[in-house]
Image (spheres, coloured by chain):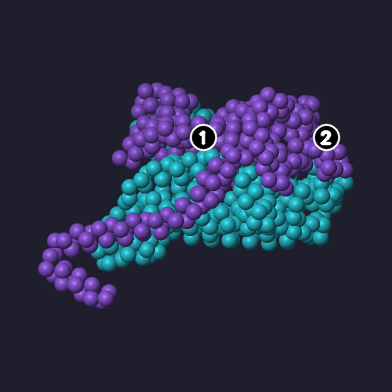
Chain colours: A cyan, B purple
Amino acid sequence: MSTASVPTTATFARRKPPAHVRRKRFLVGLANYSLVIVAAALFIAPFVFIFLTSLMTNDQALSPHLWPHPFRWQNFVDVFHKSPLWRWTLNSLIYMSLATLGLLLSSIPVAYALSRLRWRGRDAVFIVVLIALMLPPQVSVVPLYVMWAKAHLVGTLWPLIIPNCFGDAFSIFLLRQFFMTIPEEYLDAARVDGCGEFRILTTVVCRLAKPGIAAVALFSILYTFNDFFLPLLYTIDSPSHWTVPIGLAQFRSLHQVQWNLTMAATLLVMAPVVLLFFAAQRVFVEGVTLTGVKG
Amino acid sequence: MSLNTSVDAGAAALAAPVIDRTRAKRKAARRRRGLVLLFMSPWIVGFSVFFGYPIVYSAYLSFTHYDLLSAPRWIGTANYRYLFHDDPLVWPAVRNSLWIIAIGVPCQVVAAFGIAAMVARARAGVGLFRTIFYLPALAPPVVATLAFVYLLNPATGPVNLALSHLGINGPLWFQSPQWSKPSLVLLSMWQVGNTMIIFLAAILDVPKPLYESAQLDGDGAFQRLRWVTLPTISPVILFSVVIGVIYGLQYFTQAYVAANVASGQASQAGDQTVNNYGYPEGSTLFYPVLLYQQGFRYFNMGYASALSILLLGVAFVVTLLIILNSRRWVHYAGAERG
């Protein structure tokens, strides 16, 4: 409905285009809408099937019927009995919170030094940060594993958390981009008032770059929650330290858990992420956009 | 004594303010250097302990035989000779990784651009559509992979059921060496939300007068897309190709989980002792999976180091090419702002 009304009001002030042009525009718009809706349906469909399967009985999940016959809401309770999902969630929360905290505390001063302090070699160091950011984590993983094995920390969450307390290349990069946008006048004003660089960082910069810091925290939360390679590396032989992704990946083979319960678990795991997204949608979209446009 | 010197210094300052000013300046410079060092210290420690040292040590380990139990034993270039000449899995793994970069990345970029262009054209509901197309990107990779193995189950999955209603005999997807990689590409196209959002923002940023002048020239919708939108946002497209290549080099999680779950599905018993890396028939054995298997399942640490050094070499060349070329798209962004 609105499709038809918007163009007419928009073109009202100007000269009306001839009828055949309007008809063509309308048809192109209509075709575009149908395409978007079909594509959107395709993107939504997997969620629908996951949801339907999570309500089936096990027998039905392996049958060609797509609509749950008895709706088995019990699945969402059974998941917790059949697997230590709480334990995995707790481990994920520990990893997530400590890593994010350490990452923010260590990356903010580095990003500040790389963006707002002037010193020789700054640009060279920034390029080194970029290189570290782009190299695959697998290039350094063997000696790191040896290191953590010698420290008797393989099989715990510490090898995942500790490196984050020493600056994370992606966060440094993103925070730097945010800090660059703060006008120099604010910092100069604080300097004139006798603020030391440390006070400027903790008061002026951190307050003005709050959306940036929120975005970095959000990305870190998502990254640690999704992280698979490192937890697999360090905790695979120690099931009491599994995070949610490791547990889920072993779900079927280890516990003989059925597809209906697996799908119920995936929904339970996705739910907090989606809720977080809706709660902080603006921060998300701005953060993602900034990584791309200003990269 | 020290009190005396400071009094002397105070007296000297009164007598010779010029000397004092340079001294104060030097002191301030030293303080500032200390401050920079202090602020940079987390990164300096982190970079040397968790990045610089491991790479150097990795280079050393790649010339040894090391199983974590006994000390590394120097074996010269044996690891590299085995890597380049004898290991039957290296070249398939390299080919698989190249495949996922050469086919997967263009598929993702085209999908993201197509969706972004369509959403940008929609006059109403841009926000709603953006959310719908972004949502799958929020599913953790493990979760999304699990879901796709189920959805693409050859016999009972909804996708093949839908295809059979259309009279099409669906492929075996994750159970077939020909279709396992395309299945993974399909999965990555479903999770293309991040790229799509970046493209959408860039398309909505294209200056309106450019479209209007194209319209005056009588260009149709498709021509405007081809000659106005595409060139204007090309830096962003280039950027996402770069990110895609970088991720392609470390492609691991989806391949590992898909092989693990699909093979468990095939054997019903879900036997963990069966070696299922790269299932089916090594078609999802990507280079990082091979490295993981050699290093952390077989504990061939020396050989895994050699594999990681080769990866480092390739990744470093790619990274360097990107950074050297980046001036171009940084320049674009600057020109836009100005």
Q: How many marks?
A: 2
Amino acid tagged 2: Ala
The numbered mark at residue B233 is none
Amino acid tagged 1: Phe
Relative height, residue B19 to residue A233 (above, below): below
Please tell me whether mark 2 sits on a helix, a strand or a loop. Answer: loop
Distance between mark 2 and mark 1 Cα atoms: 44 Å
Q: Quadrant of residue B167?
A: top right
For disc 1, the marked residue is B316
Say which of marks 2 and 1 sits in front: 1
**Residue at position x 66%, y 32% in the image:** B79
**Residue at position x 41%, y 45% in the image:** A125
Query: Between residues A77 and B103, which one lies in front from this camera angle?
Result: B103
Residue B140: percent from the left, percent from the top? Answer: 65, 48
Chain letter of disc 1 in the image: B
For disc 2, the marked residue is B155
Does residue A7 appear to the left or right of B299 in the view shown?
A: left
